[in-house]
Image (cartoon, helix red, strand yellow):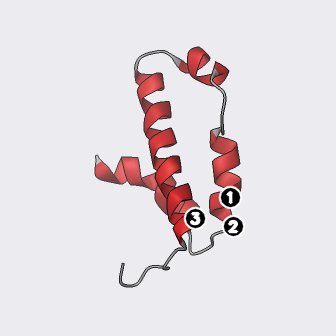
Amino acid sequence: MSGQTKYTESQQQLLKTFRAHLQTVITAEQFGLRARLSQLPGAKTATYCIHLAKLGDNTLARELAAPTAAI
């Protein structure tokens, strides 16, 4: 992680759960299941974004760009 912020264990868990959530959102969109996804309980993208924005160091932008950069 040289050059990047070192995160606490709870912050790392937040990042991991956001990545899983983002993958679920992408997959739901690909298969036309957006309506079903919105009915699921739990945190939504906006909730994650609020918390990731508070981490600073452009964490939110980096996480949101990661799927596109991977392509």
Residue 10 quadrant: bottom right
Name which residue lies at 46% across and 33% down. Answer: 24
Q: Residues within 10 Å of mark 1 (few under 14, many from 20)?
A: some
**As displayed, is residue 57 above or below residue 34?**
below
Residue 33 lies, in percent from the top left, at 50, 16
Inspect the image, locate mark 1, and give the three-letter code of the amino acid beneath it: His
Q: What distance separates the C-alpha of mark 1 from that of mark 2?
A: 5 Å
Amino acid type at image mark 3: Ser
| Cβ atoms under marks 3 and 2 closer than 8 Å | no
User: Quick one: SS at disc 2?
Assistant: loop
Q: Nearer the viewer, mark 3 or mark 1?
A: 3
Q: From the image, tell me which residue sits under label 1.
A: 51
The one nearer the camera, 11 or 70, is 11
1 and 2 marks in contact (CB < 8 Å): yes
The residue sitting at 45% across, 43% down in the picture is 20
Label 3 crowd (10 A; few <14 / some 14-19 / many >=20): few
| Three-letter amino acid code of the residue under disc 2 | Lys
Q: Position of residue 64 (x, y in %)?
A: 50, 52
Badge nearest the viewer, 3 or 2: 3
Q: CA distance from mark 3 to mark 2?
A: 13 Å
Q: Residue 10: give its label.
A: 3
Residue 23 location, x and y as percent?
43, 38
Element on which disc 1 rests: helix
Location of mark 2 (residue): 54
Q: Is residue 2 above or below residue 26?
A: below
